Image (cartoon, grey):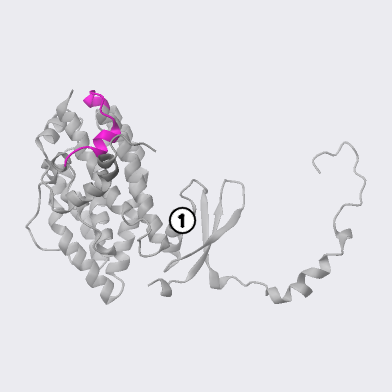
Amino acid sequence: MKKNWPLWEVFVRSKNGLEHRHFGSLHAADAEMALENARDVYTRRNEGVSIWVVESKNITASNPENNGELFEPAQDKIYRHPTFYDLPDEVKHM
Amino acid sequence: MNENLYKYILGVADNNLILGQRLGELCGHGPNLETDIACTNISLDLLGQVRSYYQYAAKIAGDGRTEDDIAMLRRERDYLNVLLVEQPNTDFAYTIGRQFLFDIYHLLFLNELQKSKDLTLSAIAAKSIKEVSYHQRFSSDWIKRLGDGTAESNSKMQAAIDSLWSYTDELFHQTQADELMVEKGIGVDITKLKSAYFNKVSEVLNEATINIPESKWFQKGGKEGIHSEHLGFLLSDLQYMQRTYPNMEW
């Protein structure tokens, strides 16, 4: 049975006002069952107020083999961080 | 002590304990990880509710008995649950069928128990309703999935419903204690829930393309303490630690 059930990714919002975060994945026959399973597997310890599920095959992911060209060029561009400004003392929480 | 109220509470609570124990047997043995966790979640909901009932019963008994004594140290004939909930987890269709046939009753029952003149019972009912609404949703969904699934899942679901059907009528059987509590406005007149129950059950079974059994022959006895052969085995599992190591704690 399980072999036929597709994989779903589960996103849970832990509090109103916060964003949904990726919590994990599970197997389910369809979206409705995925929601029920997500409720039972990921929110039984009071972790959430909202759940999204999306079938894993619908997610397009970057290929780890391309990490070099995708991400390494950003490693030596420290000037892209706003760390070269002198902040007045009056500005807090930066 | 109010013997009738005590018995009434046990008649309500023992269903939770025994069904909770049955579902707990699936811990680590469910058909897959997701349904395994779902069944044990339901088990824990039922056991959480039963603690409130037994704590109240212990108070009514007023002789030093605790909730644990009531749960663990009675003999088979002193358990007042319906026969339905003690039936074994033959396969997943039976587990779901048993759950469904109980959940529909349980939710109707709690809706009425909320109106009880006994404030402790009405508070327990109000607190349990959300949990049981989810149980009913879960089991009804699975009835439809299995009934209206493949030819094999349909025949297994049909076999489970056919076999469990004879235990449904007992849900509406009133003991003497039940009747006395109904008179006092404490207990629920369950005989009045019967038509709503069979309407709701039929509605879901129809949608699931499961035939409603025509048999008019029903089992009863559990509410009077006369159980099927399965309860003794269940209790020996449940009570083993307390019987073997009396008063042990952890």
Q: Is residue B68 left or right of residue B223?
A: right
Dot 1 alpha-carbon crowd within 10 angstroms: few under 14, some 14 to 19, many 20 or more: many
Residue A21, position as x, y percentages in the image: 60, 55
Where on the picture, by quarter, is residue B4?
A: top left
Furthest toward the left, the residue is: B217
Q: Nearer the viewer, residue A88 or B13?
A: B13
Q: Quadrant of the C terminus of chain B?
A: top left
Determine the secondary structure under disc 1.
Answer: helix
| Residue at the (53%, 65%) spot, across then down | A54
Location of residue B199 with respect to B17 vertically, above or below = below
Quarter of the image where one finds residue A11: bottom right
Whole-percent x and y of residue B205? 23, 63
**Residue B225 drawn above or below residue B93:** above
B50 sits left or right of B87 in the view = right
Q: Chain of mark 1?
A: A
Residue labelled with disc 1: A41
Q: Residue at x 11, y 38 (%)?
A: B175
What segment is highlighted magenta in the picture?
B59-75
Vertical side of A71 occupied by A84: above or below:
above
> The disc labelled 1 sits on which kind of residue?
Val
